[in-house]
Image (cartoon, rainbow, N blue to C red):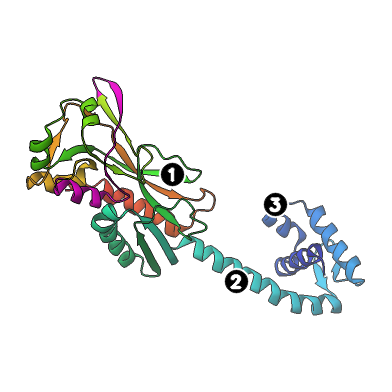
Amino acid sequence: MDTRSLMDMMLFVQVVDMKSFSAVADKLDMSKSVVSKRITRLETHLGVRLLNRSTRKLSLTDAGHSLYEHCSHLYADAMNAEHAVSKTQSQARGTLRISAPTGIGNKYISPIVSEFVQEYSDLKIDLVLGQATQDLIGDQFDIAIRFWEQPSSSLIAKKLVTKGMTICASKAYLKKRGIPKTPEELLDHNCLIHSSQPYKGEWSFNYKGETKRVSVDGNFRSNSSLALRTAAKNNLGIAMLPEFLAYSSIKKKKLVSILDDYSPKDMSIYAMYLSRDHLPPKIRLFIDFLVKKFNQKDFWI
């Protein structure tokens, strides 16, 4: 059986149910003549008359009764399948697989995920921290949370929030090596580099309305901001960290903020996903949840 004949059978079921070519034509936004021609085409294909037509009503022939009994079940199954898919697409269900950096993942994403999954109990969460993937298909991730100045990717990037950065080091390091007064003086220091972010060895600063970029280097790199923070606290060098990760260490005087007059360029947290088309509810709802939480007052403290 070809697809066209199957579609004509589904149309035949609707004509019988609604007892009218005109009603079906209105429902499906097609002309009455097209509906009539398709029923005639089905009759020609099967070699039997299915409907007795008059100006006032339609009636089924014996062959029509037989075809309707078989096709009505097929039509009902198709409608149930469509309803099941639509229901899935309107609710958060299934498994949501998330990739996030270790730093913000442990402290911020994990509590949000716990709250989110309590609200959407039909959903399962698989949270993977520390994997800086760009291949969402190959690694089977629905969302990747990334901290970028500007994402350079073929993925869709939804900005969740923009946060400040801070340049910091321990008192012991600064006492030994001196306090840099300008970004250029960082060239004489051991700088701790984040290896997974696009700027890597280039740090950007806003100063009097202009952007200053300085290429820095050092003997320690990591794809984890937490590891860089630990290295800085252990007197290894100068780090550029998100303010919310440096805040408690600065408050406890484990780290010292420097170059405050040269504001490091802000970074934004993005949700990266594959496509805007037919975005599953589990992704859309989680992104909305992240935006709401990230922008709450005092969330990052």
Count of all numbered marks drawn on residues in the image: 3
Q: Is residue 49 left or right of residue 73?
A: right
- Residue 71 is situated, as x and y percent measured from the top left of the image, at 74, 74
- Residue 75 is situated, as x and y percent measured from the top left of the image, at 69, 71
Disc 2 designates what residue? 80
Q: Earlier in the sequence, mark 2 or mark 3?
A: 3
Residue 212 is covered by the magenta coloring: yes
Can the viewer see residue 54? no
Q: In the depicted view, which residue is nearer to us: 128 or 227?
A: 227
In the image, what residue occupies the spot 8% across and 42% down? 172
Give the amino acid at mark 3. Answer: Asp
Query: Disc 2 versus disc 3: distance between alpha carbons?
Result: 22 Å
Magenta residues span 207-235
Residue 7 location, quadrant: bottom right
Q: Is residue 183 above or below residue 254?
A: above
In the image, what residue occupies the spot 12% across and 40% down? 173
At numbered mark 2, what does the secondary structure look like: helix, strand or loop?
helix
Query: Disc 2 versus disc 1: distance between alpha carbons?
Result: 35 Å
Nearer the observer: mark 3 or 1; the answer is: 1
Query: Disc 3 versus disc 1: distance between alpha carbons?
Result: 37 Å
**Mark 2 and 3 residues: CB-CB less than 8 Å, in contact?**
no
Graded by Cα atoms within 10 Å as few (under 14), some (14 to 19) or many (20 or more), the crowding at tag 1 reads many
Q: In the depicted view, which residue is nearer to us: 136 or 231?
A: 231
Can the viewer see residue 291? yes
Q: Which mark is residue 157?
A: 1
Nearer the observer: mark 2 or 1; the answer is: 1
Give the amino acid at mark 2. Answer: Asn
Q: Earlier in the sequence, mark 3 or mark 1?
A: 3
